Amino acid sequence: MNNTYKFYQNKQCEYFPCHDVADSSSFNCLFCYCPLYLKEPCLGHPDYILNGKGQRIKDCSSCTVVHRPEMYEKVLEELGRQDQEISINIWNLREQIWDRMAQIASWEQMEPEMHRQHRATAISSITNILEKHKYLYRLNVLLQPFAKECVREDRFIFGKQEIYCNVLERIERSQIETGYVYAFHAPLFEMEETDSLLTQYYLEIFQIACMDVVREWVQGYLERKHSVMSRHYCSPSFGPGFYGMEMAAVPKLLKLMDTEKLGIRWKDEKMDPSMSIVGIYLVSREDILSNCGDCVSCIGGKDGCRFCVNYHKKPI
C-alpha cells in the first residue's frame, strides 16, 4: 500500500512490525502509540496485568486494531467522542430500591399482614430473577458532557437543535459550570406466564424504582466528580415530561449520544425499550435548582407556567 494520510509504514523502524502479524504488508504505522489507550472501553480487546505497584494496566501486545488500515475512520470517530459509560451494580443500591418501591406501592398505608405479604412477594421475586440472570445486576448509564454555553435563557442549544425548557428561566445561569445529557434503561427481563399478577406488578415497580434510584446515584456521582478541588452541586435530573421540557425533546436528546450501544433507540415515535429514560444534569458552583414541586410536575407547555410567562426576560 502507498503512504497516505490514512496509511503510513516505516520499515526502517527497528520495531517494525511492532506486533506479531502474519502479513506485514498492510501494517499501518500511522498510530504508532495507540491513541485509545486511556479510553475505557476502547475499540480493541486488551489484556490486563498488574504492574510492580499493584496497578491494573492494559497489555495491548496482542491487539492490532489501530494498525489495520480500514480502522482509520473508526479511530478518529472514537477520538472525537466525549461520552462516558458508567456501570452500576444495582444490588449495592437494593435498600434504596426497596424504600422507593415501598413509596410507590404505598406499603406503609397497608394493614401489617398485607404489608408483610407484599414486601415478601416483591423482594423474593426480584431476588430470584437477579440470581437467575446475574447480568441484570449491572446497569449502564451513558453520559454526554456539554459546555455551559449550550444553556440559554429558556432553552438548550446543541448545534442546530433547540430544546425549550421552562425551568431554565428560574435558575442563575452564571453559576453553571457544565452539563450532561444522560440515558439508560431499567433492567430488562421477560415476565413468566407462571408469574402471579402481584409478582408482575412488583417487577414493573422494581424497574421504575431502579430508574429513580439510579438517577439520584448519578447526581451524587457527578457532584463528587466535580468537587475534587472545590465544592460543586449537581441538579436533580430533568428532561422530557418534567421540569418544563416537552416530550418532543426525547428524539433530539437521543441524537446527541450513541444510545444504540446501550440498546436504546427511537422507534415508532417512542423509546425502545419502553423502560428507558433520557435527560439532563447541570453542574454548578451553587445550588441553582432546588426541588420545586411546580417545576417537577411541569410537562413543559409551550406557554409555560405563570412564573415562566411573567418572568422578566434578560438578554441571552
Image (spheres, helix red, strand yellow):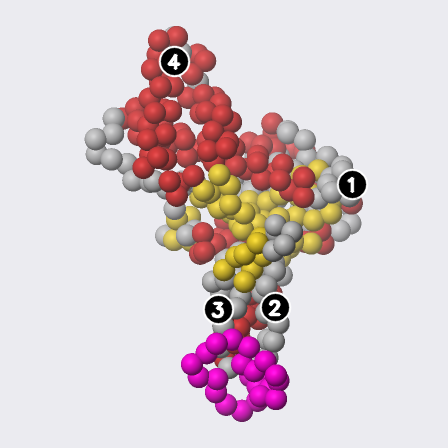
Residue 283 image offset from top left, x and y in percent = 69, 43
Q: What secondary structure characterizes most of the magenta part?
A: loop
Q: Is residue 280 above or below residue 2?
A: above
Residue farthest top in this picture: 112
Query: Depth check: 171 or 19 in front?
Result: 19
2 inside magenta stretch: yes
Q: Is residue 254 above or below residue 185?
A: below
Amino acid tagged 4: His
Marks 4 and 3, the one that precedes in the sequence: 3
Judged from the image, the secondary structure of the residue bearing numbered disc 2 is loop
Query: Depth check: 150 or 124 in front?
Result: 124
How far is disc 2 from disc 1 in space, using C-alphas? Answer: 31 Å
Determine whether label 4 and label 3 are within 8 Å by CB: no
Q: Is residue 290 above or below residue 71?
A: above
Marker disc for residue 230: 1
**Mark 2: few, some, or many residues within 10 Å (few <14, many ≥20)?**
some
Residue 226 image offset from top left, x and y in percent = 71, 44
The magenta span reads: 1-26
How far is disc 4 from disc 2 in space, using C-alphas? Answer: 56 Å
Determine which residue is flagged by label 4.
115
In this rendering, position of residue 250 left or right of residue 53? left
**Mark 3: few, some, or many residues within 10 Å (few <14, many ≥20)?**
few
Amino acid tagged 2: Pro
180 inside magenta stretch: no
**Mark 4: few, some, or many residues within 10 Å (few <14, many ≥20)?**
some
Determine which residue is flagged by label 2.
35
Amino acid tagged 3: Ser
Q: Nearer the viewer, mark 4 or mark 2?
A: 2
